[in-house]
Each structure stands twice: as structure tokens, then as C-alpha cells.
Amino acid sequence: MNITTHILDTGRGKPAFGVPVRLLAQTADGWVVLGEGHTDGDGRVANLLPPSAPRAKVYRLFFDLSEYKGFYPYVEVTFAPQDERHHHVPLLLSPYGYSTYRGS
């Protein structure tokens, strides 16, 4: 399974570059970091789930927006994959709002 993301800054009309993103998995003992990266020039982060990582029922993407100079210092998106397909979870960011969806 692959887990990827990207951030589109709809207020600026361009991808968000250089944003730290972490992928966490829910375990019986709490949340564990599985992978991390920074958005590239297209606002994307390639596969955050290492092949050796254990599979979880629930994952969380943590977008650290503290250096991005916006209203939200961070955004957390929690999701539960229903299968082993590629999961692309984008973040659409605006000055005072955000949304996300299950991409392809």
C-alpha cells in the first residue's frame, strides 16, 4: 500500500512548498510515526509508508504549517483505509479554511 499527499494553497493559487508532513499509525499504545517528508515544488510528498512498516487500521497525516505563515499552525487528517490500494489524501488550504478528500 502507498500513502501519498499534496497540498494546494487555493489562496495563493499554487502548491505549498516545503511543508513538513508526518504519517502516523494508531496502535494500542497511541500514535507512532511511520514516515515523514516535506512537500516538493509541486506540493507533493511521495510514499510516506515504508514497505517494512506494519499495517494499521487507522492513520493520521500531520501537516506542520507553523512556518507556512497562515491561520492554522497544523492540520491533522485521520483516515481508515478499507483496502490495500494506493491512498492519496490531499489537503486544500485556504487562508481561513481547509478541506481534504480521498484522491486517486
Image (cartoon, helix red, strand yellow):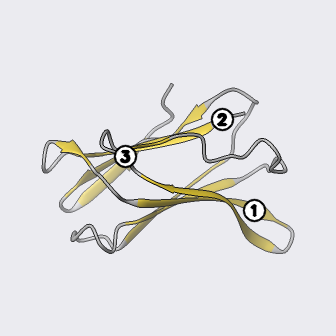
Relative to 62, does residue 52 appear above or below in the rendering? above
Would you name the residue on which mark 1 appears? 26
Q: In the displayed structure, does residue 58 sit left or right of residue 71?
A: right
| Residue 7 on image: x %, y % | 35, 47
Where disc 2 sits, the SS reads loop
Residue mark closest to the camera, 3 vs 1: 3
Residue mark closest to the camera, 1 vs 2: 2
Q: Residue at x 14, y 50 (%)?
A: 11
Where disc 1 sits, the SS reads strand
Mark earlier in primary sequence (1, 2) = 2
Mark earlier in primary sequence (2, 3) = 2
Relative to 88, does residue 11 appear above or below in the rendering? below
Q: In the displayed structure, does residue 18 sit left or right of residue 86?
A: left
| Residue 2 on image: x %, y % | 66, 35
Q: Amino acid at mark 2?
A: Asn
Q: Residues within 10 Å of mark 1 (few under 14, many from 20)?
A: some
Would you name the residue on which mark 3 appears? 40
- Residue nearest the viewer, comparing 102 with 36: 36
Mark earlier in primary sequence (3, 1) = 1
Q: Amino acid at mark 1?
A: Gln
Using the rendered view, name the quadrant where residue 72 is placed: bottom left
Relative to 18, does residue 73 appear above or below in the rendering? below
| Residue 100 on image: x %, y % | 41, 45
Where disc 3 sits, the SS reads loop
Would you name the residue on which mark 2 appears? 2
Using the rendered view, name the quadrant where residue 14 is placed: top left
Q: Amino acid at mark 3?
A: Asp
